[in-house]
Amino acid sequence: MPNNTGTDDTYSWLALHLTPGLGSRSIHRLIDRFGTPGRVLQANLDQLQAAGGLRKEVARRIREKSYQRDPEQELKEVEKLGARIVTFRDPSYPRALRQIPDPPMVVYFRGRSIPADLDLVGVVGSRTPTPYGVRTARGLASDLASMGIGVVSGMARGIDAAAHWGALECKGFTVAVLGTGVDRVYPRVHRDLFFRILDHGAAVSEFPLGTPPEGRNFPKRNRIVSGLSRGVVIVEAARKSGSLITASLALDQGREVLAVPGSIRSQRSAGCHFLLKQGAALAESADDVLETLGLPRRAGECRGSRFHTHSPHASMGREETRIYDMLGDDPIHIDEIVGTSGMGIGNALSLLTKMELIGLIEQLPGKMFVRL
């Protein structure tokens, strides 16, 4: 057993963190009272209850070392994984996260360290986005990375994943805040994305190793997404969605909230339009984000905006241009393309395939097409 008497060591922080029923606010109060987590572990039952306002059951768990997991074994597994634990008083604890009302006392990190001078912006949104939302999130994150800004998101399906990929394609730093332990990949379809993030950014979580993706974890996760960020951009969100919870948390933390407008016909943009009506800043470009947050433009590792739609390819012929001009953000079925253009279906499909190969359009399931 590590010697933790009167010390401020990682084991003692972790022991408190792994005590069932003991949240970050209570740990903070106890450490303010006793000075170090090691001294908290040495306190008697009455002292613990008086100092932290704890229920007797929780105070007894501290005294009896009734932990969720064995802290010593947890430390060994973290080391074996190549991860690390950063505690609230560690100099490498993210400065922005330290300032929120309910900062996690222990954070698990995997991947690279977050540079102390790196400005981070959160980009979040729907798990079931439109093609417009995916393109916008990816392009916005790519542009932010090209300006030397790090991108934070939650590695969920949809907008979150698009934001991470956008930052990575510009060799930018991206942080995935997980609702699981850092040893879990969720959703599993993002395995490749997860390990790319570890190579070029960081995965962080306040949850112990092995924690599964339980629903109650994700609102807690969201406060870290916004807490790490200078501001949060909502790309697509329904009127009732987790992204609006993130926006609310960001406001509570004194962070700026920005929203990307969408189609007035799209329920997936209803939440963004609600935020704009409530005073959120309009985000039509990465420049809007930097201006709103008062951030400097720095040199990233790639150049050129990807936020807006591509112009027609210079080598496109008349028929290709006619099809391209028919397409937009809303998917169009091949039958409508054929009927409007007057082309034969074989010719139209051949032209669509050619445009897809050069990256101008995308084919969706059901023979639906959208412009990129």
Image (cartoon, rainbow, N blue to C red):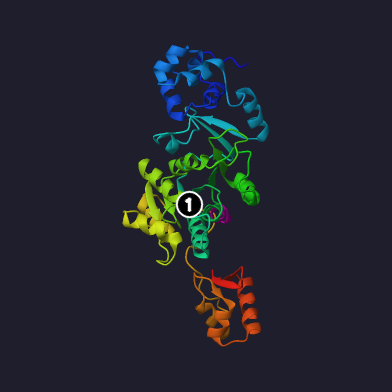
Q: Residues within 10 Å of mark 1 (few under 14, many from 20)?
A: many
Q: Quadrant of the N terminus?
A: top right
Q: Residue type at mark 1?
A: Val
235 lies above or below 112:
below
Over which residues does the magenta segment extend? 165-171
Q: What kind of element bears circle 1?
A: strand
- Depth order, front residue of 365/139: 365
Residue 342: x percent and y percent?
A: 56, 88
Asked if residue 5 lies in the magenta stretch, the reply is no
Q: Main secondary structure of the magenta part?
A: helix
x, y percentage for residue 19? 53, 24
Q: Which residue is mark 1?
A: 124
- Viewport quadrant of the C terminus: bottom right
Q: Where 258 falls versus 372 (above or below)?
A: above
Across and down, in percent, residue 102 comes to 42, 34
Tell whether 348 sits left or right of 307: right
| Frontmost residue, 27 versus 55 | 55
Q: Residue at x 57, y 42 (%)?
A: 202
- Kindly identify the residue that appears in the image at 41 percent across and 23 percent down: 29
Q: Residue at x 65, y 35 (%)?
A: 82
Viewer can see residue 197:
yes
Depth order, front residue of 168/299: 168
Can residue 317 be seen in the rendering of this structure? no
